[in-house]
Amino acid sequence: GLIRHLAFVSSNPLDWAWPEVFGFCVFIFLMQGVMAFLINVCFSPVSEIPIKQKAGDNPKEKKYIVKVLEEFETIDHVFIMFNKLVTTVFTYQVYAFAWNSSNVEWDPSKLNIANTIGAMVGLYLVYDFFYTLFHRLLHVRGLYKWVHKHHHRQMAPFRGNLDAINVHPFEFVTGEYLHLLCLWVVPTHVYTILVFITFDGIFASLNHTRFNVIIPPSIFAVKAHDTHHHLPNWNFGQYLTVWDRIFGTYKDHWMDLKKE
């Protein structure tokens, strides 16, 4: 296929020498920053979700009802750096899996509805099913304070990728490698994997911005995840709202409830 003819990816990743693996990981590390920058630029015209504030006499005085983590602490920087490094290794392993798996088609002439659109739907449904269950587990009393509480110190995400990956390493590694489970379960084309992994990064970052992005009919909505950050017993899905609706854990955003 076309991807396999590119100079940098013309051989099995498992056969790469250490300098090639290192170069690939450095490239992925740098691309995380590029993607974060492009998301802010491309979505800047989109209306923003306000942070709920207390009523006051002075509208310019911001008194938020929810806790806004405006400055990172040392532990935040450590977790973010660790998770960025994990992302580089994970991406390499996704590529190695795609190269060696019989579940992944590489021939461009064999692109079809099943291994593109069908596979994409399957990948998102499978991923969010397992992620929703995992996410709910992280909120179990007794476990919550050891892992997921760190992420919920930010009740109104606004930094995008940085707030998205500011999670406990156990949570981040599990969430990342659930993607590999999906690729193992759902037969797909390598081009579909490229789109799937790229959009996963975009959606996860958007979920931690104030950009009011919605894919109708609320299949994906930044407001859904924003709700979860200040009402943590609702909206456990990562990319979709479908499983929360099925499990009865979906809640509309306070802005939408106010309109009713």
Image: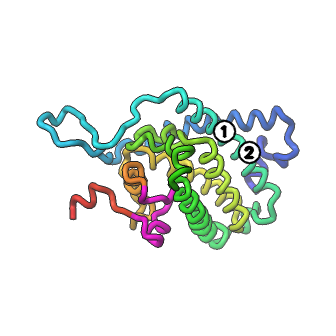
Whole-angstrom CA distance, mark 1 to mark 2, is 9 Å
- The structure residue drawn at horizontal position 49% and vertical position 36%, both measured from the top left corner, is 37
The magenta region covers 233-250
Question: As displayed, is residue 223 above or below residue 25?
Answer: below
Check whether the beta carbons of the residues at disc 1 and disc 2 lie within 8 A of each other.
yes
In terms of depth relative to the viewer, which is nearer, 86 or 109? Answer: 86
Q: Report if residue 170 lies within the magenta region.
A: no
For this orientation, the residue located farthest to the front is: 142
Query: Magenta span: helix, strand or loop, mainly?
Result: loop
The residue sitting at 84% across, 49% down in the picture is: 12
Which of pointers 1 and 2 lies earlier in the amino acid sequence? 1
Farthest-out residue, top? 74
Mark seen at residue 92? 2
The verdict on residue 247 being magenta is: yes
The residue that mark 1 highlights is: 28
Question: Vertically, is 229 above or below 133?
Answer: above
Local packing at callout 2 (Cα closer than 10 Å; few below 14, some 14-19, many 20+) is some
Label 2's element?
helix
Looking at the image, residue 190 sits to the left or right of residue 201; the answer is: right
For this view, does 223 lie left or right of residue 122?
Answer: left
Q: Amino acid at mark 1?
A: Ile
- Image x and y of residue 41, in percent: 43, 39
Does residue 90 appear in this view? yes
Which residue lies at the image location 64% right of the left edge and 50% below the top edge? 176
Report the label total. Answer: 2
In the image, residue 51 lies at what x, y percent?
30, 44
User: How far from the left and from the top, in percent, is residue 19?
Assistant: 82, 32
| Residue 23 rendering spot, x and y as whole percentages | 75, 33
